[in-house]
Image (spheres, rainbow, N blue to C red):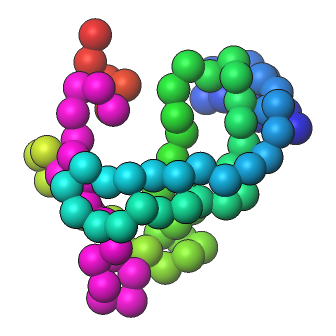
Amino acid sequence: MPVRLADGNIVHSAGVGTAVFMPHLSGPEIKFSPVLHVPALHCNLFPVLHLVHFKGFVVCAERETISFRLAADNLFTASITERNTGLFG
C-alpha cells in the first residue's frame, strides 16, 4: 500500500498488523490494529488526530507527558522525550 509523506514522496508498506504500545508512566499495554509496517520510515508514526476525530479520544500534552482519555477514563499516559519526538538532533 502506498503511503504519501508530507514532502510529497511516496513509500510503500510491507504489510498490515498489530502494534503493541507499553506506556512508560501509567496504563496497561495497548494494542493498535490495523497498523502499517513501512520499513522505509525510520521512526514510528502515531495517528493522534485520527484517534481524536474518528475514535473520540481526548489527548492532552504538557511539557513532558501526553495523556490519552476515552469516555472520561484515562487510558494511558506516556512521557515526551528527545528519543520519541523526532524533533531533537
Residue 19 in view of the camera: yes
**Of all residues shown, which one is farthest toward the right?**
1
Vertical side of 5 occupied by 19: above or below: below
- Number of numbered labels in the structure image: 0
Residue 8 in view of the camera: no
Q: Locate the N terminus and report the quarter of the image it occupies.
A: top right
Image position, residue 10 (x, y; %): 78, 23
Q: Main secondary structure of the magenta part?
A: strand
**Of all residues shown, which one is farthest toward the top?**
89
Image position, residue 30 (x, y; %): 47, 63
| Quadrant of res 39 | top right
Q: Is residue 72 magenta?
A: yes
Residue located 77% across and 23% down the image? 11
Q: Locate the C terminus and report the quarter of the image it occupies.
A: top left
Left or right placement of residue 83 versus residue 4 in this view: left
Residue in the foreground of this view, choosing between 6 and 16: 16
Residue located 31% across and 85% down the image? 73
Residue located 71% across and 30% down the image? 38
Left or right placement of residue 35 versus residue 42 in this view: right
Q: Is residue 16 magenta?
A: no
Image position, residue 54 (x, y; %): 59, 73
Residue in the foreground of this view, choosing between 50 and 81: 81
Residue located 52% across and 66% down the image? 51
Vertical side of 31 occupied by 5: above or below: above
**Of all residues shown, which one is farthest toward the left?**
63
Which region is colored magenta? 65-84
| Quadrant of res 83 | top left
Residue in the foreground of this view, choosing between 4 and 73: 73
Image position, residue 42 (x, y; %): 56, 19
